[in-house]
Image: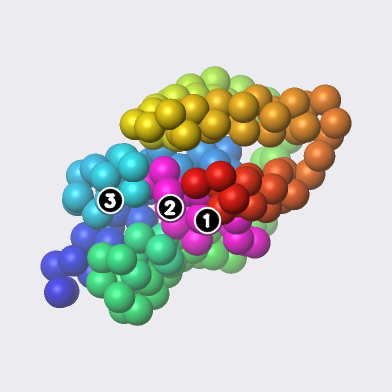
């Protein structure tokens, strides 16, 4: 059990330390750790993202709690969440003044400009991987996932429906249709 807790701590510490760009940017890093340690396969990882997005709060901590719990019960959830938030807490406490001082530094801005396309590529990778799982059609009824996705995209981009409402509507559609 201690090895599993240590793996959870190291995996989530590594993912959270490299997750520049906010919560969604950490998802591919968590996915890589899941693959490395065998915590979740691709389909279960997609389910975890869907469940985590349906709940309030930061995605990284919800994913950490879920994966940690599945791997090692409550101690696993505690260790994974701690590893996810610990670097940020320590950095903000100890480096807060430096971050404030150099926030508008041209060198820092240049570095951030360079990392944004990488974060976008990582998010695209996760979206494609999730899409493969979401649209794997094994029965005719599962073809209904396509109009659900099209309707969600239309409501999001054209009607500007709040994403939380779309998640609830998607869950309701899934409950009714599947």
- At 31% across and 40% down in the image, what residue appears? 42
Residue 47 magenta-highlighted: yes
- Left or right: residue 125 compared with residue 147: left
Crowd tier of the residue under label 1, counting other residues whose Cα lies within 10 Å: few below 14, some 14–19, many 20 or above? many
> What is the magenta range?
45-63
User: Dividing the picture into quarters, in which one does residue 177 lie?
Assistant: top right
Furthest residue in direction right, as rendered: 159
Secondary structure state at the residue bearing disc 3:
loop
- Left or right: residue 26 compared with residue 39: right
- Left or right: residue 41 compared with residue 103: left
Instruction: Give the overall secondary structure of the magenta segment.
Output: helix
Q: Earlier in the sequence, mark 2 or mark 3?
A: 3
CA gap, disc 1 and disc 2: 6 Å
Say whether marks 1 and 2 touch (CB < 8 Å): yes
**From what the image shows, is residue 20 above or below residue 3?**
above
Asked if residue 71 can be seen in this view, the reply is: yes
Spot occupied by residue 43 in the image (x, y as percentages of width and height): 34, 42
Q: Nearer the viewer, residue 39 or 171?
A: 171
**In what quadrant of the picture does the N terminus appear?**
bottom left
Q: Earlier in the sequence, mark 3 or mark 1?
A: 3
- At 37% across and 47% down in the image, what residue appears? 45
Residue 67 magenta-highlighted: no
Crowd tier of the residue under label 3, counting other residues whose Cα lies within 10 Å: few below 14, some 14–19, many 20 or above? some
Question: According to the image, label 3 marks what residue?
Answer: 40
What numbered label is drawn on residue 52? 1
Say whether marks 2 and 3 touch (CB < 8 Å): yes
């Amino acid at each position: 059990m201690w090895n599993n807790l240590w793996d959870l701590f190291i995996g989530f510490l590594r993912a959270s330390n490299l997750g520049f760009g906010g919560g969604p940017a950490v998802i591919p890093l968590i996915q890589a750790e899941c693959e490395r340690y065998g915590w979740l396969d691709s389909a279960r990882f997609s389910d975890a993202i869907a469940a985590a997005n349906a709940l309030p709060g930061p995605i990284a901590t919800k994913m950490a709690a879920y994966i940690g719990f599945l791997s090692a019960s409550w101690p696993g959830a505690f260790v994974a969440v701690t590893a996810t938030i610990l670097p940020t807490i320590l950095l903000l406490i100890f480096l807060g003044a430096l971050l404030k001082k150099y926030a508008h530094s041209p060198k820092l801005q240049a570095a951030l400009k360079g990392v944004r396309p990488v974060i976008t590529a990582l998010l695209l990778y996760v979206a494609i991987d999730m899409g493969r799982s979401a649209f794997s059609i094994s029965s005719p009824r599962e073809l209904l996932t396509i109009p659900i996705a099209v309707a969600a995209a239309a409501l999001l981009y054209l009607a500007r429906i709040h994403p939380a409402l779309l998640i609830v509507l998607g869950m309701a559609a899934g409950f009714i249709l599947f």
